[in-house]
Image (tube, rainbow, N blue to C red):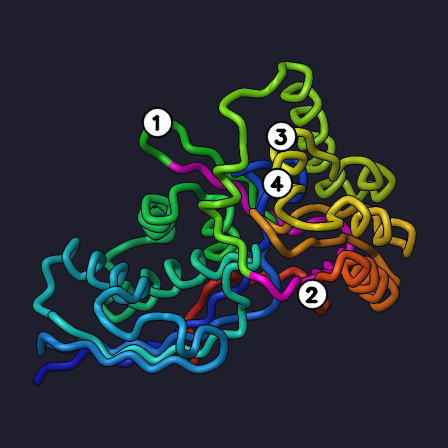
Amino acid sequence: MVKSETVIVQVPATTANCGPGFDALGIACNIYNKLELTLTEENKIEIEISGEGVGYLPINEKNLIWKVVKDVIDKTGAAYNGAVIKMHNDVPLSRGLGSSAAAIVAGIVAANYALGEPFNKQDVLEMATAVEGHPDNVAPAIFGGMTVSLCSQSAVKTISFLPKLPLKMIVAVPKFFLSTKKARKALPESIPIKDASFNIAHVASLVAAMCTGNADVLSYAFDDKLHQPYRAELIPGMYDVFAAAKKAGALGAALSGAGPSLIAFSLDNEEEIGRAMVETFSKYQVPSSYLLLNIDTVGTHRIG
């Protein structure tokens, strides 16, 4: 049985939207999944999972990583029909930290390495976006840092940069799942033009503040009227958790992706902010824990 070279890649968690930047903004975070991949000619897949998702993620042909690996193989016409997949997951599942994007990107990047790198990063971005449906999580997972992305006709355009602020991220993670599909169903078909205008101004201010290092602007730039008000009913106490984070010293707070995790942004007082967020959730009978994260500056890459 002919095997490819074994490849190990590391992919970061991501937080998307950052408040007003719906489907456009994302940040890579320093918690990671690792994927070890060996392609085989034999028509058989072996999948081993540790960490998050054990007993929940499928270990057969329905596994998302295998699906994207198979797609990459098919695009090249290579003579591989199976794979040995070993994954260790530290990114929480269905919590708004880009677990599906991490799986998609890890599978594409690992398969690309195993096949001799026939695709560049832009190709990887295009393929990952096609699977995920939008680039806000896959872009920072690939490039690291903070990303601004858009889809222009059939192309995906992304700018990646490092904010000029020593930004800390405090993520309150509730102990319940919330699917992106359910969170999207909560959104209306249309919004008032005044709300669209509000978000345009706030997302522009947010990106400008990150690029210039103006922390004062961040005290109001995370506000949103496009998606968070409609998803609030899915996350008990959301706005009170935001308020508690800001009272404890956060510059601002937002839904992390589609939720249910809530993320605060700060320059200091991380532990105090995390405790305040968890305590406020508990007032709504929502058990949670908090993560203290930094920005990942590298994105998905090969290790070992």
Q: Position of residue 52 (x, y in %)?
A: 49, 75
For numbered disc 2, what is the local secondary structure?
strand
Q: Which mark is residue 231?
A: 4
* Nearer to us in this view, 230 or 151: 230
Q: Position of residue 189 (x, y in %)?
A: 49, 24
C-alpha distance separating marks 3 and 1: 23 Å
In whole angstroms, how far apart are the C-alphas of marks 1 and 2? Answer: 35 Å
The mark closer to the camera, 3 or 2, is 3
Q: Residue at x 48, y 48 (%)?
A: 180
Q: What amino acid is labelled 2 in the image?
A: Leu
Q: Earlier in the sequence, mark 4 or mark 2?
A: 4
SS for dot 4: helix
Q: Nearer the viewer, mark 4 or mark 3?
A: 4
The answer to whether residue 36 shows anywhere in this view is yes
- Tell me the residue that label 2 is attached to: 293
Point out the tag, 3 or 2, that comes first from the N-terminus.
Answer: 3
Q: Are marks 4 and 2 in contact (CB under 8 Å)?
A: no
Q: Residue furthest front?
A: 285
Is 72 placed above or below 227 here?
A: below
Span colored in magenta: 156-176
**What residue would you read off at disc 1?**
153
Nearest to N terminus: mark 1 or mark 2: 1
